[in-house]
Amino acid sequence: MDGIIIINKEKDWTSNDIVQKLKGIFHEKVGHTGTLDPLATGVLPILIGKGTLLSKYIINHDKEYIATIKLGEKRSTGDSEGEIIEKQDVDEKMLQEENVNEVLKSFIGKSMQTPPMYSAIKVNGKKLYEYARKGQTVEVNSREIEIYNMELISISKQNKEIKYKVNCSKGTYIRTLSEDIALKLGTVGFMKELERTKVGNFCIEQSTKISDIIENKENNYITIEKFLENKEKINLDKKELKKFLNGVKIPVLKKDDIYRIYNENNQFIGIGKITNNVLKRDIVI
């Protein structure tokens, strides 16, 4: 089985929990394209068999999230699992719809963001959360992120909560974004809930839960060929195919891109990549 399964990750599962569970089901190599916090739910693309080779095509995909910010409290981890380390008042003006919309829209565009200490980024061979759990701090470089759109979903004045949708680039930390939104509103806050609703073209409507996979292994399974259906196809004759399979470069007059490769009988062979009018083997199924 070679391809992709879009998992709807449930709360309290780690991304590695999902990988290990699916290894036991499929008895194949299994990987993911980026962790999703245990607290978070939603879209987690899982790569099966030779589908793991697709990681480089998925890892840089943009993301969409729905998040809830709890205002008035700052947590050590930036989410509801941490200890309360600060409290501030939340006045009525902060939660006015016009004010919240103005603040959300101000984050649209490119900016520099510093990843939170409770994250899996490695510094000197150790993950940041390993330092954080020991009360240690290390210097973390800021990185450029981009927010494409921010949309207010709801405001709960009683609970002092804001729910919003964000479309953003790879590497954006929603915990940090939620804290920054709270600060711009004039208080502190933390990310209470998070659901990832989209990774690239993979959306929550396509996803399936682990329990459904156990009952039906083919549930929402996306083949490598299906994943690349929007890419142009190239049919190779026997001579060209032999060269392709042996890693020999083949001259072609096509634009730089990745292509679906087929034999003379229109059977899918794998993925080829063209650079400077030269076709080279990338993935063979």
Image (cartoon, rainbow, N blue to C red):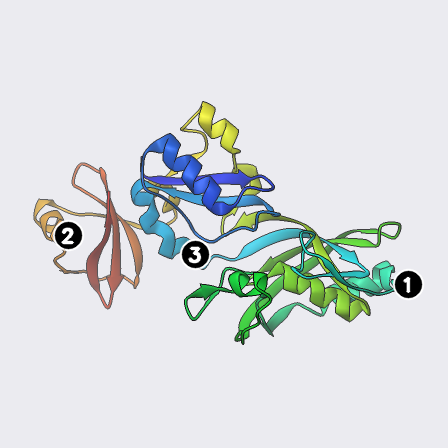
Location of mark 3 (residue): 59
Q: Is mark 1 on a helix, strand or loop?
A: loop
**Viewer-nearest of discs 3 and 1:** 1
Res. 271 visible in picture: yes
Whole-percent x, y for residue 265 in the image: 18, 36
Q: In this view, does 187 lie to the left or right of 265?
A: right
Q: What element carries label 2?
A: helix
Instruction: Name the residue at the top extreme.
Output: 215
Kind of residue indicated by mark 3? Ile
Kind of residue indicated by mark 1? Asp
Work out which quarter of the rendered image holds the C terminus and state it. Answer: top left
Q: Is mark 3 on a helix, strand or loop?
A: loop
Kind of residue indicated by mark 2? Phe
**Viewer-nearest of discs 2 and 1:** 1
Residue at x 68%, y 60% (from the top left corner): 150
Location of mark 2 (residue): 244
Q: How crowded is mark 3: few (under 14 residues within 10 Å), some or many (20 or more)?
A: some
Whole-percent x, y for residue 26 in the image: 35, 32
Location of residue 191 (image quadrant): bottom right
Whole-percent x, y for residue 186 in the image: 82, 70
